[in-house]
Image: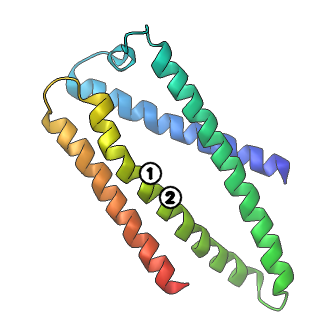
Amino acid sequence: MNRDCLKYACVATVVWNVVLFSLVCISAYVRKVGITYFFDDGTGGVGMCLFLVLWSIGVFAMGYHLRKKYIEEREFYRKQAPTLGKEVVEKELRRYCLLRVSKQLAILTIVAVPWYFIVHVRDAVTTFDICAMSLLFVFSVVLFVVYKRCKAAV
């Protein structure tokens, strides 16, 4: 189980960092600035790099913990209901996990809207900033709807 959790945590961390790097590259391209623009925080980039490292460690820990909890819950439900088929237990457990994760991500993305404004808007608010904050807000609403539908199904 430990190896499976580590693998899942590594995959989650790599995927998250690829998404972040892609967003930084897209943002730099749209704003016509270099990537170093986002690391110019007055400390020579140390503060932003430290933040990204800590964030990656947090994503790794969340991935590890979520996989460990998923495996433990799967085994618990299989022992509690041995007459149910393996597929039924997996389907219901996935729905339950989707319920939890969608709620957490909805909260995360709605909190990200003001943080995006605080961290990335240095000059006047541009159309790109409005689009980015709108996308975060829409993503949060979609995740909240998924959460509510999964909750109604459970």
Residue under the point 59% across and 37% down: 14
Residue located beneath label 2 in the image: 104
Task: Give the residue furthest to the top.
Answer: 44
Give the amino acid type for the residue marked by disc 1 in the picture.
Leu
76 on left or right of 103 = right
Q: How is the image coloured?
A: rainbow
The percent position of residue 30, horizontal first and vertical second, equals 22, 28
Residue under the point 29% across and 24% down: 28
Out of 93 and 119, give the one closest to the viewer.
Answer: 119
Residue under the point 65% across and 48% down: 63
Dot 1: element: helix
The percent position of residue 72, horizontal first and vertical second, equals 80, 65
Residue located beneath label 1 in the image: 108
The percent position of residue 117, horizontal first and vertical second, equals 27, 36
- Residue density around tag 1, few if under 14, some if 14–19, many if 20 or more, within 10 Å: few
Question: Is the Cβ of the residue at disc 1 closer than 8 Å to that at disc 2?
Answer: yes
Task: Give the residue furthest to the bottom.
Answer: 83
Residue under the point 48% across and 18% down: 47
85 on left or right of 126 = right
The percent position of residue 22, horizontal first and vertical second, equals 40, 33
